[in-house]
Amino acid sequence: MAERVADIGEFGLIRRIGSLLDTDGRRSGRVTTGIGDDAASFLPRAGYELLVTCDSMVEGRHYLPAHTRSFDIGRRAMTLNISDIGAMGGDVLYALVSLGLPAQTLVQDVEALYKGFLHELNPLDASIIGGNLTGSGNGMVIDITLIGEVEQGKAVRRSGARHGDAVLVTGFPGRAAAGLQLLLRGAHEAGLADNPLVSAYTTPSHRARVGRLLAQTGYVTAMTDTSDGFPGDLGHVCEASGVGAKVVKEEIPVDEAVREAGRILGRDPYEFILGESDDYELVITCDPRHVPFLRSVAARCSAVPLTEVGRITAGRGIDMVLPGGRKIPLDAAGFDHFRR
Amino acid sequence: MAERVADIGEFGLIRRIGSLLDTDGRRSGRVTTGIGDDAASFLPRAGYELLVTCDSMVEGRHYLPAHTRSFDIGRRAMTLNISDIGAMGGDVLYALVSLGLPAQTLVQDVEALYKGFLHELNPLDASIIGGNLTGSGNGMVIDITLIGEVEQGKAVRRSGARHGDAVLVTGFPGRAAAGLQLLLRGAHEAGLADNPLVSAYTTPSHRARVGRLLAQTGYVTAMTDTSDGFPGDLGHVCEASGVGAKVVKEEIPVDEAVREAGRILGRDPYEFILGESDDYELVITCDPRHVPFLRSVAARCSAVPLTEVGRITAGRGIDMVLPGGRKIPLDAAGFDHFRR
């Protein structure tokens, strides 16, 4: 019978995870105390600021266990955090993983989860240096703290957007939202797991490498990742910067697959593109003169498009300019974890 | 009617917490990005290593909401983490707080929780620089990541105990375990909240200041805090150091209140002292010649006793020497979050 965490206990599970990290994970010479002590320790680099972020995933709320493999849940949980470090212009260094686990969780599922974490961390030469395990009565809770670094003074915040700046976005907003709807509708359809929109939801890609390269140019005035949907996250930039924005509907990149999903689901594709969608794309602002240079920098490291979709305005709120010139206000509320 | 988090939403709650931290919390000049961006950032100090730890508290599992005020839950959750940084010999710098909250949680309870966090952080000049809020279907989950620093090369690990070292412990092990049993037994008794053993469970004290001072002497070979009970945590030191230990029963400090609780509950007080008890005391090892000096250092900053209770041995496992000289093995399993 498959082993459960109740069978091997907390300390048995810690040993199991420790040996998995030893064989499959990276090691950093700057880590002076790893897993298994009261705290982990590492030596920071002179001339760098440290970045720290944390993000949780709760079973049934942030992922659907029936539709998602543990490996993919691990990938997704780590990607959300990597995305945050990248959106500040940083390099990822170390993760701490705090798990709340029902006693009946399969040990192999916990191992698959960690393999998912490492699948995302290894290419960045980043490692897991600590964490915490605890029991959980109802479903799994994954809480990751990710530590990164950025050259002193080079962090890009949400608060630097200025009136007249260009607004750009990577990739195609709305893919994850469309994927989630396909997943919910066609729960048992064969081949659904291979649908690129479904994958965009279950195992999103981060744009941390692009974010870091763009930040290093010094030309990005504000940056954030899209976890609440494009208008929601652009709204966060506007609020933090004390500005507004104008977005041109025809300029917003529309993925052909999102259009197709709209047809299948009988929905306007802009419901996905302008609604809540945790795509982990980047919203970027810069002086319009630097757009061509930034686009060329992005193109050097990634095939993902970087598209100019509008301008920062002196006002408040976000307007969308429709074909023909009429403006409508864009709701920038974003996803709210308690209101729904 | 009292406001609930569902009424003000995630972003409303973030604003509420932000303004509480502004008025009641400390600020650090080294923090370059605070709450409200993709990640927080800070400037590390040259010549220091960074320490990171995380610990969770799950409602119903790590605390009993019926018996504990939100303020005290906040104090306790932060104390567990502070204790870990102190047990490495470090100073506490910054916290990230990740909360899973049922939508029906009262806003005032969340605010009280944060006041509890600050009650513990402010005396250490430490601050909350980030976190995450998410919904939770079943009960509150509090996950704290705490960042500290220690002079390069001065971190004290569990792995440095050597054959012949003295074993010392701060305070009186077993107080929290006795307090928990009093709490469970006398759920509705008046005055129970003021019982010092009950307080030792609900709002334990950390020994971070003593731990830091002792570490700075350079004479501590290994150190850990007691969250699994004295034998369990001494066992962690022994395992990490590849040694055993011999503990003299008559030397283990016995709190008069624990003896009294034993009488009230009809239990041998050593069930508490040698069982699972999250006391957040320190277990320390050092060359026996340094014991008087370390005790004098500890006495300078705290009235809590530092007691020599045994020796590190070349073998494996922990033996307890009874009055008369007979040895019995001490179970060092400690608390296991999944096995019970």
Image (cartoon, coloured by chain):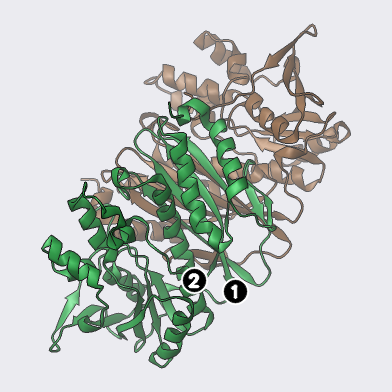
Chain colours: A brown, B green
Q: Is residue A128 visible?
A: no
Q: Is residue B149 visible?
A: yes
Residue farthest along the left direction in this orientation? B266
Q: Residue B95, image x and y in percent?
A: 54, 54
The residue to which callout 1 is attached is B151
Badge 2 amino acid: Arg
Helix or strand or loop: what does disc 1 sit on? strand
Q: Which residue is found at the position 76% from the left and 41% from the top?
A: A300
Q: Chain of mark 1?
A: B
Q: Residue B243, image x and y in percent?
A: 32, 80
Q: Which residue is found at the position 34% from the left and 70% from the top?
A: B236
Q: Which mark is residue B209?
A: 2
Observer-nearest of A323 and A134: A134
Q: Residues within 10 Å of mark 1 (few under 14, many from 20)?
A: some
Which quadrant is home to the N terminus of chain B?
top left
Q: Which residue is found at the position 54% from the left and 30% from the top?
A: A200
Question: Looking at the image, do the residues carrying marks 1 and 2 touch, with CB atoms under 8 Å apart?
Answer: no
Q: Is residue A75 left or right of residue A189?
A: right
Q: CA distance from mark 1 to mark 2?
A: 15 Å
Q: Which mark is residue B125?
A: none
Observer-nearest of A204 and A142: A142
